[in-house]
Amino acid sequence: MTRPVVQVAVPRPLRRIFDYSLPAQLPQPSIGARVRVPFGRSEVLGIVTGFRQMSSHRLKPLIDILDEDALLARDLIALAEWLSSYYHHPLGEVYATLLPSAAKRGALPKPRWPLAWTAATDDGGRLARAPRQRQAFETLQGLGATVPERELRTAGIDRRTLAALADKGLAQSSETKPTYRVERSPISLNPEQRAAVNTIHASIGTHATHVLDGVTGSGKTEVYMRVIAKVLDTGGQVMVLVPEIGLTPQAMAHFRRRFGGAAALHSAETDNARLNIWAQCKSGDHRILVGTRSAVFTPFADLRLIIVDEEHDTSFKQQEGLRYSARDVALKRAQLLEIPTVLGSATPSLETLANIARGRYRRNVLKSRAGGASMPQFRVIDIRGRRLRDGLSDTLLHAIRRHLDAGNQVLVFINRRGFAPTCLCSACGWQARCADCDARLTLHESPRALHCHHCDRRYRYPDACPDCGADTLVHLGTGTQRIDAALREHFPELPLYRIDRDTAQGPTRFAAQLDTIRREGAAILVGTQMLAKGHHLPAVTLVAVVDADNGFLSSDFRAPERTAQNIVQVAGRAGRAERPGEVWIQSYDPDNPNLKALIQRGYAGFAAIQAADRRSARLPPYAAMAMLRAESTNAHAAVELLRLASDIIRRAWDNHGRRTSGDRPGRPVQSRSEAPIEPGSGSWKSAATAGDTHPEFELMGPVPAPIPRLRNRFRYQCMICSRRRGPLHAALSALEAAELVVPKVRWSIDVDPLDTF
């Protein structure tokens, strides 16, 4: 009998599947199982994708089969195929992204649970000559019937002693799996919340996408809880995605308090812990999973609901390797499983709002804050011509003093860490720049040093200007450390907490900081967008936005949307419970139409203006977009690869035009930039040439990336826009098929990019 040829996806940047023969001593593996195969001069772990009857080539044999059954269920196999097709990424690397690191190294995903120990009623004199074991036995008896092992370790009893007691029949261990329960909530829903719960619950068992569009503090979490309770009642599982690790402790506390259990999955966990949680969800023992971006790939026994909280957040987008959006992957996975998805946000993305307008998503609006709390009042401080004290105006300082004197807390928001983003010499103009990147260095205090926020290289702070030797170094701009120092000087009698990436390292430490703040009286909080995302800070009554202008004036077409979302989200920390809140925004451009719309008409009014601008400019969500990125130690090699890629795309689009227009010749695609481009030479506009202003397709570049050189590698990019998504993917598929290679150049395709300029 002829044995089938096994098709395997290997974790390499190669856009094809490889065939292997199946040795007689090995059984036929399942599709979705891991296998060990020879690849070049090494061995790798791959995933079985299928079989065929014969091959015309001499094949290498499989070495080993790691899984008796499929490690990945059918929905994840189908999802991997979609990810590879939609994001135009090699299938083997897609599978590698789906698996936890320990599983990629060959570890078996078997669920393990914490142990609890029970002592026998009497030792029968068998411990007379083992005083250490006898002491442990008596301690175990005194602690109660069943004692968690972690509690015994705290009491000084190690695993070896417990194992010795178990060998003598004097102690017995058992696994402690979570016991999920559904308790009646003491909170009364308002009519808007009740309508949302009923609408979502009615769709359980079908594929539907719900948008929970609720102002900050409107009780979206309670809606999640009620819907989760209904899923748990029927024995199903729920996945909850959050954008930041810092949000997991708060969510876990909510779910464990209400339902008795929940698991967390994020990058701060060890590899073995992540594999264990992965296996516990796959077995069905864990019924609620809270996780960040990569948790979207977790296998489940009976997943019936996916919730994406803060769906607008850019942290859901992976920026390297497989550049997926966890929100969009969650929607696709829900479609494959025919289950509902809930997208929650106080500031829905323009993509989500466009899908609501097209009738693809169902909108549930929560207009009022839960418990009758009022929305904060917005005020803009015109700082044109004013003297600022380390970035703070006298008007803002007086407002801060007023709220602190009333015993409240103040949150000062600036989305830039460090002390000052620019250090220069006022005598000769020298600027501190990174030797490995085309970027300025940021001054950090305590200890004083210059940091590159892109490659993380650090430099000693110079005693004088390295160029002219003058003692005239000045620090321009403001970061969290500078605001921290200024506020400590103005309000030395009050506690001040700074929360940014430099101080909040790890979810446990971050959660402890927030708990301390909640117990505090009058206090000042200084932070980046880490503080803006869903944290409950009931004593905050004033939110101060120090610098709102950069985002609204940026050349990146997405920057105004992100800026408005940050302002609304951080403003939502003010005025919870019975305390009214205020939001003060400093601006050099108070008449900016985006800022005025946000203040006067709220986020919905701002989004309407942005949507109209995007539609007229034919930008997402009213066009499909992809970015081609190339990097190399040789700038011209990176440009050459992108030019070759552009030629392939132009030909593909030209062929597409002929197919779609019958006998008419295809419309030539507008190509921008044929002249050589030097690093740092300009932008899309400077690289563009005149052409058709209304093309079906638009290809812009190659141009230098926003940071043209990073870690001593030159980076270039091309932007591709299309009125329709199908032709864009056809062109990218043609580019994949060409298997484009230029020596020493790494390149990638980014579909639905968030960073464009």
Image (tube, rainbow, N blue to C red):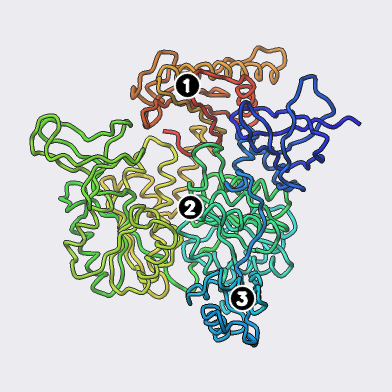
Give the amino acid type for the residue marked by disc 2 in the picture: Ala
Of the numbered discs 3 and 1, the one sitting upstream in the chain is 3
Q: The N terminus is located in which quarter?
A: top right
- Which is in the foreground here, disc 3 or disc 1? 3
Q: Quadrant of residue 351?
A: top right
Q: Secondary structure at mark 2?
A: helix
Helix, strand or loop at disc 3? Answer: helix
Of labels 2 and 3, the one closer to you: 3
Q: Nearer the viewer, residue 131 or 652?
A: 131
Q: Which sits in the foreground, 607 or 217?
A: 217
Q: Is residue 154 left or right of residue 732?
A: left
The answer to whether residue 726 is above or below residue 639 is: below
Marks 2, 1: nearer the viewer: 1
Name the residue at the right extreme. 1
Q: Which residue is mark 3?
A: 165
Residue in the picture at 56% in, 69% down: 159
Q: Position of residue 635 (x, y in %)?
A: 40, 20
User: Disc 2 versus disc 3: distance between alpha carbons?
Assistant: 66 Å
The residue where tag 2 is placed is: 604
N-terminal of the two: label 2 or label 1?
A: 2
